[in-house]
Image: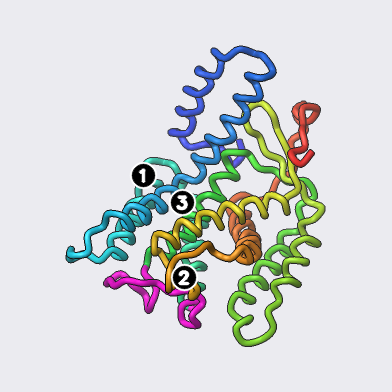
Amino acid sequence: MNGRTTTPLEQRIDAAAHRVIARFPQSTGAKVGVELSVFVLKQAWACVFGAAMLAVLFATRLWYPEDVVLARNDAVTLAAVAIQVLMVTCRLETLRELRVIVLFHLVGTGMELFKTSVGSWIYQGEGFLHLGNVPLYSGFMYAAVGSYMVRVFRLFDLRFDRYPRRWITAVLAAAIYLNFFTHHYIWDLRWLLLAAVVVVFGRCWMHFRVFRLRLRMPLVVAFLLVAVFIWLAENIATWSNAWAYPDQLEGWQLVSVAKLGSWLLLMIISVVLVTWVYPPEEPESDGVDPALRTVTG
């Protein structure tokens, strides 16, 4: 048994879902509908940490009273701690996965402290649960990305064909992380690093199981799709005053599409951290491969 087995709660949900799906007709249209529905539900299940964080930010943006003792930033931080505790106690995340989520938290907080000090973005509002200019809930937003990454690995049983050597990906991730700091003082190497991502990961295909079908897509395409998803979530977060970019201080506006490059680079750091918990595995040759489909056509 590999290390990607589902949690007991997920096993119960899976068994109940199979009982429901068994009643569906076996027509081609019904099968396609089942695969699509399961894909959406699995993605939503993988995003539960991030969705809960966005819900807290959205709700406190609209309804949090201004005349209470507990500052909004502190309330969001306490809610984030409660979400993380519930994720573990309800067995939505394993203790093994929690290790890498905590690492996401630390890596993200370090970046937040630096980026706010140079004015890349700003946190507004007061509170006690701050580290410098950074409210402590900021690290949980990175943890939410980490939670999604480790859970999607498990829920979709991700496997990789021609995955690059992990030491190469680690060197690339370290260079990316370093560039997030150094580009304020020397040359910004993000375009060179994006090219390096294509070179290192360009030959790799990601295989994933939805329900009955195992599908595949180029890994770089998967990076881009997740970056788009995070960019959309970032727009909700900035609208909710979780933080603001300098051009949003006079009034909210859409986050620049150029941020997609930054989020794609962050994906490399994320994947390298997750492969510490779930080392990349080759696709199984278990008779499923004849049913393989290529997502990108």
Task: Measure the C-alpha gap from mark 2 to mark 1.
Answer: 38 Å
> Is 104 left or right of 268, judged from the image as shown?
left
Question: Disc 3 designates what residue?
Answer: 50
Place residue 257 in its image quadrant.
bottom right
Rate crowding at label 2 as few (under 14), some (14 to 19) or many (20 or more) other CA atoms within 10 Å.
some
Place residue 283 in its image quadrant.
top right
- Closer to the camera: disc 3 or disc 1? 3
Q: Earlier in the sequence, mark 3 or mark 2?
A: 3
Question: Disc 2 designates what residue?
Answer: 248
Badge 2 marks a residue whose secondary structure is helix
**Prevalent SS, magenta region:** loop
Residue 61 vertical placement versus 9 (above, below): below
Is disc 2 in contact with disc 1, using a CB cutoff of under 8 Å? no
Q: Earlier in the sequence, mark 3 or mark 1?
A: 3
> Is 15 left or right of 62, judged from the image as shown?
right
Task: Measure the C-alpha gap from mark 3 to mark 1.
Answer: 17 Å
| Amino acid type of the residue tagged 3 in the rendering | Gly
Residue 89 circle label: 1
Residue displayed at 72% across by 45% down: 206
| Amino acid type of the residue tagged 2 in the rendering | Gln
On-image quarter of the N terminus: top right
Residue displayed at 28% across by 71% down: 127
Q: Position of residue 241 (x, y in %)?
A: 39, 64
Residue 166 vertical placement versus 133 (above, below): above
Badge 3 marks a residue whose secondary structure is helix
Indicate yes or no whether the magenta region holds residue 207.
no
| Amino acid type of the residue tagged 1 in the rendering | Thr
Badge 1 marks a residue whose secondary structure is helix
Asked whether residue 263 is in view, the answer is: yes
Viewer-closest of 204 and 120: 120
